Image: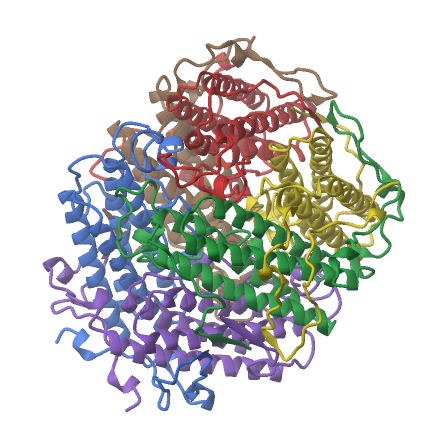
Chain colours: A green, B purple, C blue, D brown, E red, F yellow
Amino acid sequence: MFKHDKNLLEMVRVERPNPQYATMLQEQLGGSNGELKAAMQYISQSFRIKDPEIKDLFLDIASEELSHMEMVASSVNLLNGHDIDAGGSQPSGNIEANVLTGLAPYLTNGSGVPFSAAYVNVTGDLPADILSNIAAEQRAKVVYEYLHRQINDKYVRQMIDFLLNREEAHNTMFRQAFQKIQATGSNRDWGVDEDARLYFNLSSPGVNHFSVSNPQAPSFQSSNSTQ
Amino acid sequence: MFKHDKNLLEMVRVERPNPQYATMLQEQLGGSNGELKAAMQYISQSFRIKDPEIKDLFLDIASEELSHMEMVASSVNLLNGHDIDAGGSQPSGNIEANVLTGLAPYLTNGSGVPFSAAYVNVTGDLPADILSNIAAEQRAKVVYEYLHRQINDKYVRQMIDFLLNREEAHNTMFRQAFQKIQATGSNRDWGVDEDARLYFNLSSPGVNHFSVSNPQAPSFQSSNSTQ
Amino acid sequence: MFKHDKNLLEMVRVERPNPQYATMLQEQLGGSNGELKAAMQYISQSFRIKDPEIKDLFLDIASEELSHMEMVASSVNLLNGHDIDAGGSQPSGNIEANVLTGLAPYLTNGSGVPFSAAYVNVTGDLPADILSNIAAEQRAKVVYEYLHRQINDKYVRQMIDFLLNREEAHNTMFRQAFQKIQATGSNRDWGVDEDARLYFNLSSPGVNHFSVSNPQAPSFQSSNSTQ
Amino acid sequence: MFKHDKNLLEMVRVERPNPQYATMLQEQLGGSNGELKAAMQYISQSFRIKDPEIKDLFLDIASEELSHMEMVASSVNLLNGHDIDAGGSQPSGNIEANVLTGLAPYLTNGSGVPFSAAYVNVTGDLPADILSNIAAEQRAKVVYEYLHRQINDKYVRQMIDFLLNREEAHNTMFRQAFQKIQATGSNRDWGVDEDARLYFNLSSPGVNHFSVSNPQAPSFQSSNSTQ
Amino acid sequence: MFKHDKNLLEMVRVERPNPQYATMLQEQLGGSNGELKAAMQYISQSFRIKDPEIKDLFLDIASEELSHMEMVASSVNLLNGHDIDAGGSQPSGNIEANVLTGLAPYLTNGSGVPFSAAYVNVTGDLPADILSNIAAEQRAKVVYEYLHRQINDKYVRQMIDFLLNREEAHNTMFRQAFQKIQATGSNRDWGVDEDARLYFNLSSPGVNHFSVSNPQAPSFQSSNSTQ
Amino acid sequence: MFKHDKNLLEMVRVERPNPQYATMLQEQLGGSNGELKAAMQYISQSFRIKDPEIKDLFLDIASEELSHMEMVASSVNLLNGHDIDAGGSQPSGNIEANVLTGLAPYLTNGSGVPFSAAYVNVTGDLPADILSNIAAEQRAKVVYEYLHRQINDKYVRQMIDFLLNREEAHNTMFRQAFQKIQATGSNRDWGVDEDARLYFNLSSPGVNHFSVSNPQAPSFQSSNSTQ
């Protein structure tokens, strides 16, 4: 069951409306590495998890991502301001906000492409799902870095700082979870076949700088843990 | 902020696995009238609502729809059972569940088309948004009626009964909200122009059975309210 | 059978080319509340309607929406003008028009997202379909209000005025049709179950401002009719 | 302006319901080579055509394709029959028809993928547009050939025969139109550059069986014309 | 098997970064007439071709289109430059490049819509497939003509010239292939039915400027060949 | 530049046609974890890589994935057999293959959803891109495990074995590449902010089983390397 608390996880505000930036920030609302994608991915994956601690972790993080989505949308809403005007003096406005949604935030990426569950990775295999989540958190952090660089509004920057750091925290926790389950599922019997040791040199010129003589399943450094 | 309670809003169970029906039930998970669509629509609309009572209503219902999504997904998960086998004796299996998600529920409709925010209607105009929600709840009820008819599993039928009735409740409440705001936004100045009174008879043969001599903005019967 | 008359339903012209506005107007050509969506929705719904008067109404309006689509596209075509130049001095051009379609109108929304039948609602249940249509007409009106506000070209404004008023007329007629069939299909046996009377208070803080002690199926005020 | 005549262009009937075949026939309703695609392509292209005879041809054929869409949808409607039952004894049913549309025809392809304007080709260049149309008509014919082969219902076969022959007629007329405009637009100045005469042999083993020593713009045999 | 040579098929460079133009050039990377679409279409079609000379031709051209994709992407990459800044002084930037991809080229069209296999035409019928390819090459040429007109950068113009001429070469070769197989598949038994000789005059006013008294299957002028 | 060698990377054959399984195998041709997705992801990422060894690795693997795509498509082609028959005795056929592509392989997933570049992850940040690739390879392996379980055809199993092992090899090599660049890009300055150390306990009941007192950037065990 999901419950909603009208307090945001962390308050958001803006120095001033900035519709052009609102468009860009939409990337983290309805885009391929955005908060909705993250929430939906972890919720979808959680249904078949048997380990109660890991299931709990996935649902904690999923709930937080939904709460991030709410923060990002609140910020887009404030940045959109109050004046419908897609054709005016702004260098490049947020077209859908001005012709379709009445300046309400909308579940698209920065280019207006609607959110799609095609962004969501679910395999039912815990090592593959957690690796997907680690990669997703890392990509989300990168997008926030790009967004941080393109705004001077101190309140928006504060929100981005907060969210970026939360992605780091989630990433760290997913790696701890990976260590716990690393000998299971698709990580078992890794590299026992001869074909797993080959290197095909198919882009020339170029020599083999990498090799796979002793393939091992993925495993993270223990320094990621908390001892 | 969103919080998760590990208890389902209403417990779900199944008499037995039924992968073919799981496919059909996916329609209400990731389909055009499904629970995720409803939750996302009401959350997205809520950001620009100023009336605190109506905003509260939208967020109550949105949270409940997220909780319905969880119930539907839990049921799909149980119906998918434990045996990966898309090519076997079942009349027509759930292909993605068997080749992609390891039998985990997935955010698609019954045909495997990924959820898209193209299903979500947001206009920033309260009369239009509430009318969209009333229509969405009515459609969701109809889909549950179709799904009810095609399953004998008593526990699945119980869940569908519950969800179908909840859509009726939401529908009723949205109409109360509509009565409260009916003289605002796009409902103002309705039909003052001559063009709003015309009937173009463009499919022949056929005569005009309807007319628009005195156009009025939408308004529901007061019997929908509770006094 | 569909026939085409080379006269537009209502002549369109523009004071001058305005490629930036052409982009915005595309929203009503290939967007989620646009004319093509409306035409396709009513045609698709019409196939299973048995009541000849209502079927006639749906097909009259569908044919008119196709004719609106033609008007909007003609206007986009004029607004696009004659000079291919997406990178020039315009604040934000219509990229596809300049690189793909040679300034021809294109079945996308204002952001360039292709029209999708995901926008089209069909349930085979007449109350649900008509409620969907009423909501769709209200949303289409809102989009035209936004578009009206962002253009000074008097001819474009005339066209938008005309189309906006036609959506009001359609809305009014769909409500008359709803009154005729309101005791049928998904409107029957409404709210007989206890679950249809509950309110879940899931967004806090907040109290119940609405209730569902006596749920009734949707029904519009008789003042919508024409007596 | 579009007008609708309640008589189908050609009457359709079926020997008996056949939901499995209805699914397949949906391909020509909302699929990539279907009737809606053809109608939308020719309408969209027509807006910038200056030659009145060719513009007339495009709109005649577009109107006919809309009328074909109506025939195909009517046939799907009859083939869907009257019993909602996606999980029963049929080898593989039409899932959306049974859970979403109440057996109404729906604008998807045979797999349930919604119609998308991504199927529609418009360039604003007459030679390219007509070549696109010739290719589209040929593909539509092929799909009807596949569909013909998989049904024994004599009435459905009659309809497919009719539609298949109409695609041939359209194809023939588009080629006549091409001959008329063949020295214009993208067909001018063809092959004047040295790069247009090269052959890159990039899939080996294999030798050059084709060459481009004297490249000419596309032009159809005069036997396609009617003298 | 595919192999990669780190040399581009033809070297690309730019006079200076031009992010606005990079956006437009993306059309030929991930758009509906772009290089990826062409490569995927010809590869997909090749699998069922039995004639070894034609299969060889398809794979030669497909490999060249992949190599064109690499050239276009390399050029987009250079045009994107080095400064992430979607909100600055550029008239209208490449939003995804600035918020998502770190200025890397991305498989979308000029509006940011992701590449879709919905653009790819495959029928398993050789006449239909080759006609699709001739049309696709003609459209690709037209897009390059539009792109050529909107840039002054001499190196980008050189690349576009090269690619445009290559599309002409492919077009010419596909027509030679068509002549070889023109009496096969969907080109057989053309127009034998009476329905293939009708003209429906459905857009009025207008008279029949075209006729189909003697319909013939498509066939190109022999002047297209090289003997 | 890409070149094609008509020899497959590894020969494929099938014991007998199996259209139902062909549908399932399509998942790895045009699905979200399929071979085309992998090839496009690594090619797209490669454009901005400066380290020549890593760039070489990405292009070697991308070329191999294109070659895998060819193998999978060849196998789908053989499994589709020679008889167009979507409505016959097979439990659930491959609809598009029977009505659209003439049994040619098609760039969709197992449910017929067209390939979309929405599956492709590119960030321009090397740690994020490589983590995305490791996750992608692990998911691809899992899909092959599911596919392996559902077929008895020994030749198809051999192909799947080969491809599954190749994904392990790629995974291993991407981890070696990660070790080489692990102190760069988004991996720098990890966890310096207090917000990166918090745990929000948002799904109850449940306690914190994980913590982030000392967050570190991702880093794989050295045992993955080849010393």
Left or right: F195 as drawn, with respect to E154: right
Q: Residue at x 44, y 83 (%)?
A: C201
Q: Could one spot residue C95 in this view of the protein?
A: yes
- Residue F89 position by quadrant: bottom right
Q: Residue at x 61, y 24 (%)?
A: E64
Question: Which of these two is toward me, B65 or F56?
Answer: F56
B123 is higher (above) or lower (below) than F127: below
Number of numbered discs on residues: 0
Left or right: F226 as drawn, with respect to A75: right
- Residue F180 position by quadrant: top right
Tell me where residue F190 appears, x and y as whole percent.
64, 51
Q: Residue at x 30, y 37 (%)?
A: C91
Tell me where residue B134 appears, x and y as whole percent.
36, 73
Question: Which of these two is toward me, E197 or F65?
Answer: F65
F214 is higher (above) or lower (below) than B55: above
Left or right: E178 as drawn, with respect to C84: right
Tell me where residue B199 appears, x and y as whole percent.
17, 60
Tell me where residue C122 appears, x and y as whole percent.
41, 64
